[in-house]
Image: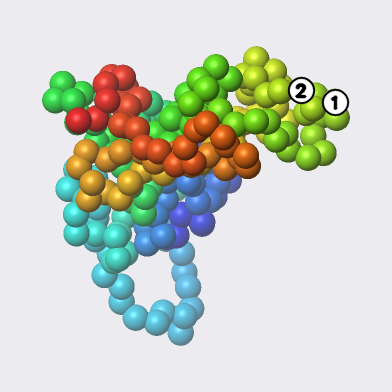
Amino acid sequence: MYWPDELPQGTHDGRKAIQGRQHYHGMNELIASNYMATINALSVASQAQVKQWDEKNDEEIQDTLYWRQAFDITTYELSTVELFCSCNTPGNPDKMLIECTTEACKKWMHEQCIVDDALTALYKRSGTDKLHVAPVHPKKGENGDEGKRPLSPSETGAETNGDGARPWEGLFEALLKPPDMDPPIIEFRDLQDGVVDGEKTWTEPVKCLLCGNHFN
Ligand SMILES: [Zn+2]
Ligand SMILES: [Zn+2]
């Protein structure tokens, strides 16, 4: 058993070449391998219990050591894990996956992807939707004159804003209400000063990234 951090350069993770720990590896996750290393017997502290994690039945694990992937030293192949969400990437066992409430869908999504999608949608409509739009406070020191004009999505979309992928940063933030909420809802917070005719925080139903239905 090895730590994900020890995955060598050139490891094949599906079609990607990777090295070391990936974003989906959990804190207590190990990698099984047929790689044999000779180590100093004095460096062995004790025997460790390592469970194999079945992704379909993920209740018990998390605070014990576990493994779900194997690394083959002869091919540098890392075995595949289940992919979730609209981003089609694995889940990190330390983070929450959210299940769609629509019977026909029931797909699992990353909490972060749901939040990012909701913020993107909010950011896009914030140019026209008066309810949650605040006067503009452009980030200081960015884009010179650009920043002095009113914010509108066409001007500050992903392509033109310095920090492309997350143009809402500093304007809005959102989080999913705790997992015991059923169905989960998303809470937005407007971070801008001087909101006059909008609310500072409000909640909305969660939208599935795959079927597009709202959770109910
Ligand atoms: Zn995702
Ligand atoms: Zn769905």
Give the percent coordinates (x, y) of residue 197.
52, 31
Give the percent coordinates (x, y) of residue 195.
57, 37
**Residue receiving disc 2:** 149
Locate residue 101: give its quadrant: top left
In the picture, measured across the screen, residue 125 lies left or right of residue 103, that is: right
In the picture, measured across the screen, residue 157 lies left or right of residue 8, that is: right
From what the image shows, is residue 8 above or below residue 214?
A: below
Mark 2 vs mark 1: in front? 2
Helix, strand or loop at mark 2: loop
Determine crowd level at label 2: few under 14, some 14-19, many 20+ residues with C-alpha closer than 10 A: few
- Nearer to me, 181 or 55: 181
Residue drawn at x 80%, y 24% as measured from the top left: 146
Determine crowd level at label 1: few under 14, some 14-19, many 20+ residues with C-alpha closer than 10 A: few
- Nearer to me, 84 or 41: 84
In the picture, measured across the screen, residue 167 lies left or right of residue 4, that is: right
Q: Quadrant of the C terminus?
A: top left
Residue drawn at x 31%, y 19% as measured from the top left: 212
Q: Are marks 2 and 1 in contact (CB under 8 Å)?
A: yes
Alpha carbon separation for disc pair 2 and 1: 7 Å
From what the image shows, is residue 83 above or below residue 177?
A: above
Residue drawn at x 41%, y 60% as measured from the top left: 27
Q: Is residue 76 visible?
A: no
Give the percent coordinates (x, y) of residue 26.
39, 54
**Residue receiving disc 1:** 145
Give the percent coordinates (x, y) of residue 127.
58, 20
From what the image shows, is residue 204 above or below residue 37?
A: above
- Nearer to me, 133 or 22: 133
Furthest-front residue in this view: 196
Q: What amino acid type should be assigned to the residue bearing mark 2?
A: Arg
Locate residue 193: give its quadrant: top right
